[in-house]
Image (cartoon, helix red, strand yellow):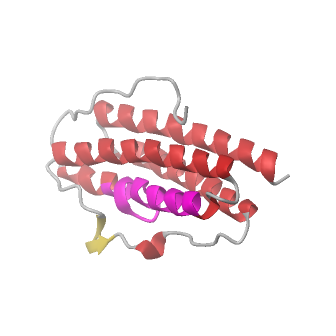
Amino acid sequence: MYSIDLPYPPIKVSKKDPKYIDLILLNYASDISEFDAISQYIYHEIALKYKNPDVSATLKGISIIEMHHLEMLGEIIVLLGGKPGYWINDKKKKYWTGKLVNYDISSLQTILTIDIEDEKAAIKQYKDTITKIDDPNINSVIKRIILDEEFHIQLLTTLYSKYVK
């Protein structure tokens, strides 16, 4: 219901390539990541639970799909020889922090706009990651995740049209 109706590819890597770990970690636990998306969707879901149950339920459903994406990326990190921690390696280890969540819940329009823009940013980052990884197994998983992210934009845009415009 909150993901497209296609199977996910098997989680495997062609070879352990440590340089891919940092690329996957960016999508796993940075400011544009599955971990950040889950945190933000759950925050928005709770904030809207009694004001707009329909939107709240959709955000919760999307967050569950994002959890599956996080799990798949974490498994890839492990297969590459890394640790699936909530950090990125940018010269030194930078840990994910709750400061990365956008806490602006001033209006439904703001919430949905933030979530749509964040999905677009995630897609852009995933596409950039694909260009830097020469592993068809990893890239097939990322491409499948992108399909879900595009579907999330459709769901969020539909909610925007229904409740904001």
Give the number of marks: 0
- Indicate the quadrant where residue 93 lies: bottom left
Q: Which residues are magenta?
A: 25-46
Decide whether residue 65 is among the magenta residues: no
Report if residue 30 lies within the magenta region: yes
- Among all residues in the image, which is located at the extreme front? 50
- Answer yes or no: is residue 91 visible: no
Residue 152 appears at what percent x and percent y? 59, 42
Residue, x 33% and y 54% (percent of image)? 23
Q: Quadrant of residue 143?
A: top left
Quadrant the N terminus occupies:
top right
Please say whether residue 58 is visible from this viewpoint. yes
Could you say which is closer to the camera, residue 29 or residue 58?
A: 58
Q: Residue at x 39, y 57 (%)?
A: 35
In the figure, is residue 149 to the left or right of 165?
A: left
Return the x and y of residue 90 as percentages of the image width and height: 31, 70
Whether residue 107 is situated above or below residue 2 in the rendered picture: below
Relative height, residue 23 to residue 90 (above, below):
above
- Magenta region, main secondary structure: helix
**Side (left or right) of 88 relative to 146:** left
Q: Position of residue 100 (x, y in %)?
A: 47, 71
Q: Seen from this angle, which residue lies furthest top?
A: 6
Q: Nearer the viewer, residue 143 or 153?
A: 153
Q: In which quarter of the view is residue 155 placed?
A: top right
The residue located at (18%, 56%) in the rendering is: 83
